[in-house]
Amino acid sequence: MAEATDTLGFIYQNLKDAGCGKELTEQCMSFVKKGDALGMLPILTKYRSSLLGTVRCGQKQIDCLDYLIYKLQKEMI
């Protein structure tokens, strides 16, 4: 993990930990290197929305499985 005082390293590591791919990371880092870190906000917001969609889809699948498990257990009693 990068030192907190190493801003570039900190941002890079955070992007990596967030699952950003190489292209997205390079895009974001180019903003940081130009001194316009806020310029990457729209990109990060879009990526976050994409991740949230994945979470919601996964939650729906879990809900379906939970219901099926519930129904199966109820029938066994």
Image (cartoon, rainbow, N blue to C red):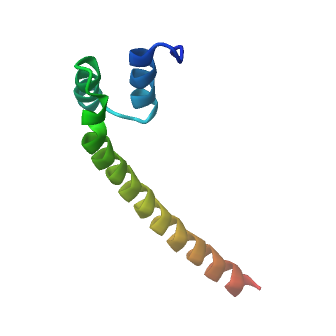
- Quarter of the rendering occupied by the C terminus: bottom right
Q: Position of residue 58 (x, y in %)?
A: 45, 60
Is 47 rendered above or below residue 73?
above
Is 55 rendered above or below residue 31?
below
In the image, farthest residue toward the right: 77
Q: How many callouts does the rendering have? A: 0
Q: Position of residue 46 (x, y in %)?
A: 28, 48
Q: Which residue is drawn at the image coordinates 53% and 18% (left, top)?
A: 4
Left or right side of 64 for 16: left
Q: Position of residue 26 (x, y in %)?
A: 25, 24
Q: Which residue is drawn at the image coordinates 46% and 68% (left, top)?
A: 60
Left or right side of 47 for 73: right
Q: Nearer the viewer, residue 67 or 38?
A: 38
Q: Which residue is drawn at the image coordinates 26% and 17% (left, top)?
A: 33
Q: Which residue is drawn at the image coordinates 62% and 82% (left, top)?
A: 71
Q: Nearer the viewer, residue 76 or 27?
A: 27
Left or right side of 65 for 31: left
Q: Nearer the viewer, residue 9 or 67?
A: 9
The quarter of the displayed image where residue 27 is located: top left
Left or right side of 30 for 12: right
